[in-house]
Image (spheres, coloured by chain):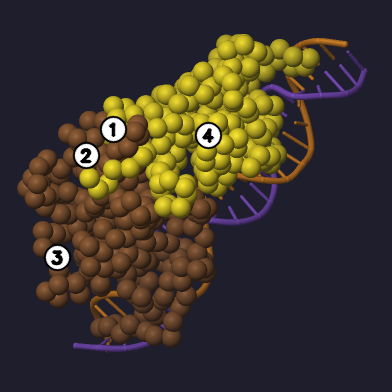
Chain colours: A brown, B yellow, C orange, D purple
Amino acid sequence: MTGALRVAVSTVIFSLRGERLMIPLVRRTRDPFAGRWALPGGWLGAEEGLDDAAARTLADTTGLSASWLEQLYAFGDVDRSPDRVVSIVYWALLRSDLVEAQRSAAGAPENVEWFDVDALPPLAFDHADIVAYGAWRLRNKVGYSRIAAGLLPDEFTLTELRSVYEAVLGRRMDPSNFRRLIEGSPALVPTEGMRTGSHRPARLYRYDAELDSIDPGPLSS
Amino acid sequence: MTGALRVAVSTVIFSLRGERLMIPLVRRTRDPFAGRWALPGGWLGAEEGLDDAAARTLADTTGLSASWLEQLYAFGDVDRSPDRVVSIVYWALLRSDLVEAQRSAAGAPENVEWFDVDALPPLAFDHADIVAYGAWRLRNKVGYSRIAAGLLPDEFTLTELRSVYEAVLGRRMDPSNFRRLIEGSPALVPTEGMRTGSHRPARLYRYDAELDSIDPGPLSS
DNA sequence: TCAAAAGTGTTGGGGATACACCCATGT
DNA sequence: ACATGGGTGTATCCCCAACACTTTTGA
């Protein structure tokens, strides 16, 4: 039957370590590209939707669930793999605290390693291009939405949130202007808690995704 | 082999008739949804890329080639079709003059009819949602890029271009402000020609896609 | 009392909107 | 001459970047 071919689902998973944007890669154990690093993913099951497949492979790879998951692009050039494969690629955000906890726990999956997005090893297939495109989409979206909070724990200070923006966008931002910018959004709700450090305590905020107005995405899917 | 399933490529093709946004639909001849209208498309061939497949099915349906073609989304819910199908959907712009010429010529393909985007018949599968999402993307993109010129002939007046914006966005725009807005873009290049009507002649412009700075899309694909 | 981060206030420039106005042509 | 769309000029508003300034804590 024409039209039948293999469909893979992969995900560019972003998290933050300090000020660096990191993604997990999986070392391939088989040809083609045995030994090379590749995006986490797997074959699309006959009885699972695309979103489900992305969430499943993400959980398999990291043991975690994402605070943001969105389709990136479908790649299907004939020559992108020795054998024809269409890859539906997603991108995701993971809260950094969950990733850290996972690393400490012995439960971290084998064959998975985190890399700085700006210092990747050679990747299998066209995955280097895919990661670059995913990073572009992330930076772009951070500019006009509030998803950046998805990289932080439940509660965070505005300075912490600002440092996320600075890490993702790669430039410094004025603290006072950042405050006004971000406080305008009803999705950032102040809590009672304060973060106490060696200086003046800072109010903790929480991100309420319900109150955000991101683009709709496909109405069904 | 797991992961092997049927992949279709469909396209939401936009053109303009007067002030109305129109798309071509194809009447299905087989079950499921025999007799219903559906997006033009076809099975992805084993030896063709996604972009190629979209361009091919677009040409099969309309006999034309698009002035803009971009991937929209990959739809793959298990229940979107009685038998499992993953659809890679594109959206495209056709110059209205080419469509009109095609209509006059007897060469127009059978089983294809153009419909007003805001007055569609019942569609097969989840195609109604897909069209709505495509229209959203078009309206969105018209707001921050210059693709709207892709709906017009090679040369056009600013008033014609403005009426495209008004048709797509569904609201009136101030002629003088529109002029400044659009003349700021180096992609709109004035020609020597003038359109003469029953009033003061208007300068003709040309759209130079080379000079535009749209988002990159995936670097490879 | 000092360092450092939290948080507030003020100012100025650029882009978008609203709208008054002049220009060129066919009838 | 006049109606009609082509095209220019200008005032205003609003958002945002820059930056001076005050507040609150730990040491």
Label 4: which secondary element: loop
| Circle 1 residue | A77
Q: Quadrant of the N terminus of chain B?
A: top left
What amino acid is at disc 3? Pro
Going from the N terminus, do you reach mark 2 or mark 1 first?
1
Res B179 quadrant in image: top right
Give the percent coordinates (x, y) of residue A179: 43, 68
Give the percent coordinates (x, y) of residue B184: 52, 32
Q: CA distance from mark 3 to mark 1?
A: 31 Å
Foreground mark, 2 or 1, reads 1
- Chain ID, mark 1: A
Q: Is residue B124 above or below residue A97?
A: above
The one nearer the camera, A159 or B118, is B118
Is any atom of residue A209 visible in this view? yes
Report whether mark 2 lies on the same chain as mark 3.
yes
A11 relative to C20 in the view: left or right: left
Give the percent coordinates (x, y) of residue B168: 62, 37
- Say if mark 2 contacts mark 3, CB within 8 Å: no
| Circle 4 residue | B30
- Say if mark 2 contacts mark 1, CB within 8 Å: yes
Is any atom of residue A137 visible in this view? no
Label 2: which secondary element: loop
Report whether mark 3 lies on the same chain as mark 4.
no
Label 3: which secondary element: loop
Residue in view at x 57 percent, y 36 percent: B34
| Circle 3 residue | A109
| Circle 2 residue | A126
- Chain ID, mark 4: B
B113 relative to B71 in the view: left or right: right
